[in-house]
Amino acid sequence: MLNHLRPALTLLFALTLLTGLAYPLAVTGLAQAVMPAAANGSLIERNGAVVGSALIGQAFATDKYFWSRPSATGPEAYNAAASSGSNLGTTSIKLRDRVQADIDRLKATGIVTPIPGDAVTTSGSGLDPHISPEFARAQVARVAKARGVPETAIADLVAQQIEDRLFGFIGEPRVNVLQLNLALDARGS
């Protein structure tokens, strides 16, 4: 029996070292060498402190910042540990009521119809850091008023922050909300 058990244990130990230690270390080392920013979570730093990630959205509630799209990650918005969609279907009364409440909130802040879809819908992960250029433009008047600056200055900043389609044809134009709000803070007011 020991003759059968010894090769099995040796193989288990060797494969554990190979697939559980050597391979992850090699992949991590390669990622750190080739694309260190992405390998470390695409973190955004300001004044030596990490303020967020370019890949995970954040909730912004005050009028002086651009708002992100809604998050479906549970009671705490943009909780990466709870990444998921809401799983509410088109016939869901709960979804309809949440979307209507979001529409009413946006209208109360001066955003007029048509309200962009991403302003009231969540992404599949609930963590999307981007909004559409249309939703960003719809918020310009509110942000400009809260900051006491001309709307044209805020609109120009939005235009500078629009990311184009990947390779010119994949995806849609988008605006990273965290980077846009950091650019707002950097310009002052």
Image: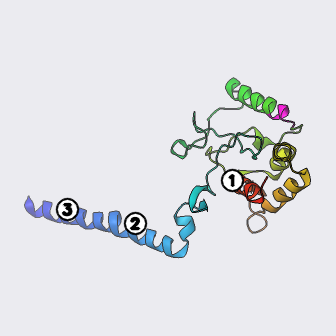
Q: Does residue 172 show up?
A: no
Can you identify the residue that label 3 sits on?
8
| The N terminus: image quadrant | bottom left
Q: Residue at x 81, y 29 (%)?
A: 104
Q: Nearer the viewer, mark 2 or mark 3?
A: 2
Q: Which residues are magenta?
A: 106-110
Q: Which residue is mark 2?
A: 24
The earlier-in-sequence mark between 3 and 1 is 3
Amino acid, disc 3: Ala
Question: In x, y percent, where is residue 23?
Answer: 38, 69
Q: Quadrant of residue 73?
A: top right
Looking at the image, which is closer to me, 48 or 65? 48
Relative side of 57 to 167, left or right = left
- Compared with 86, 91 (above or below) is above
Q: Position of residue 126 (x, y in %)?
A: 62, 43
**N-terminal-most mark, 2 or 3:** 3
Secondary structure, mark 1, is: helix
Rendered location of residue 176, percent (x, y): 71, 55
Give the amino acid at mark 2: Pro
Q: Secondary structure at mark 3?
A: helix
| Quarter residue 15 falls in | bottom left
Q: Position of residue 129 (x, y in %)?
A: 67, 51
Q: Quickly name the residue at label 1.
A: 178
User: Going by the image, does 118 lie left or right of 145?
Assistant: left
